[in-house]
Amino acid sequence: MSTRFTCDDTETLVAYLYDEADPDTRAAVARHLVECARCRGEVTALGGVRHALAQWTPPAPPLRFSLGQADLPSAESAAADNLVRPRVAAWQAVPVWAQVAAATLAVAVGAALANVQVRHDAEGWTVSTGWMAPAATPPTASQPWRQELAALEQALRSEMTVRQAAAPVAASERAPAAAGTGPAVGAVQSRFRHAAPR
Amino acid sequence: LAVQGLTITDEELVARSQGGDVDSFNQLVKRWERPIYALAYRTLGREDDARDVCQDTFFRAYRALKGFKGEAKFSSWLYRIALNLCRDFMRRQRRTPTVQLPEDTDIAELAAAGGPVESIESLVARRELGLAAERAMATLPEEQRTAIVLKEYHGLTFQEIADMQGCPLSTVKTRLYQGLSVVRRQLEEGGMSVADIRGDAS
């Protein structure tokens, strides 16, 4: 009874429109609408706007996103290791132009960074490093961690880009912990250290 | 499964996913990819951008899942991730949503989807109305548009929108009112009499 509604109270009008007003307020607005043609017109018009909005349906392309297929193995191992490996997903989110740009840069930086080379050819991804003994050949096509290598390769590219922008890096630099060596380079090095005894 | 016949709640699926069960997470993806895509589409206005944001939302959610403590609904959490990604995206692109008119939608196709009762005339009218609404929405400032999208298409309460937008309840109502008023004006300028639009049909 005591609740009153005035024409300029647009917040309450919106609450009424979306049926989020408490019962007292709702009744007050309803009483007001009986008397006030202007507000009645406004509620009707906004109701019409809502109906128009309801006709806007977004396209429905097939989505079927899943952390399956290509992404599942790394996601699973990330969960198992309790280790976050965001590179795989982040890589896939990189637009094609950026991947092309990264590839171009990687080629340019390749000369300056003679100790790390990443190639993609018929054999798949190949990572060879200056500090690597020739015997430690890259994994063959059937090995499951090729994917990881692909992700590492992407990370390497971005690190190289940063390094190139920052300062020229001595080609003889070997120690993974040396200044300027990013985590992906370190990861490659440790990967090969692990791989060496095989 | 053990709970055959019953719908497994999001919370259960989240708990299983947190335990490392990727299949459970993929069930969550299946359950929520449409709403998240629609949210991104209505925010960004382009199919390919919406797809990217939608996909990225689930990647990020998966990675951050261990940090999700269930203080909010899982869907609210997803919405928040998606909206942040949309905002980043728009900032990067420095643009407001563009209206991408779907040219390949066939009226006959719509008629089939709409069921046999609806006339072609009414279908065309509905479609025009929807396109006009889409165009008008694209002109709104981001906060107003997001508030309307969350309210109209995702049924969030004022309070949930306020939480998501980090603003007072009254601000949400103001944004809704102002946004609706702008859409109204644009529909009217486009020759549509919004007072005559009846929502009872649907």
Image: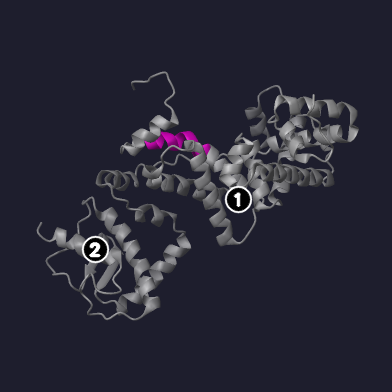
Q: Is residue B6 left or right of residue B49?
A: left
**Amino acid at dot 2:** Val
Q: Is residue B25 magenta?
A: yes
Main SS category, magenta section: helix
Q: Which residue is nearer to you in this view: B163 or B133? A: B163
What residue sits right under mark 1 in the picture?
A: B44
Measured as percent of width and height from the top left, residue B25 is found at: 39, 37
How many residues crowd mark 1 within 10 Å: few (<14), some (14–19), many (20+)?
many
The image quadrant that residue A183 belongs to is: bottom left
Measured as percent of width and height from the top left, residue B186 is found at: 79, 47
Q: Which residues are magenta?
A: B24-34
What residue sits right under mark 2 in the picture?
A: A188
Image quarter of the N terminus of chain A: top right
The image quadrant that residue A69 belongs to is: top left
Element carrying mark 1: helix
Q: Is residue A132 magenta?
A: no
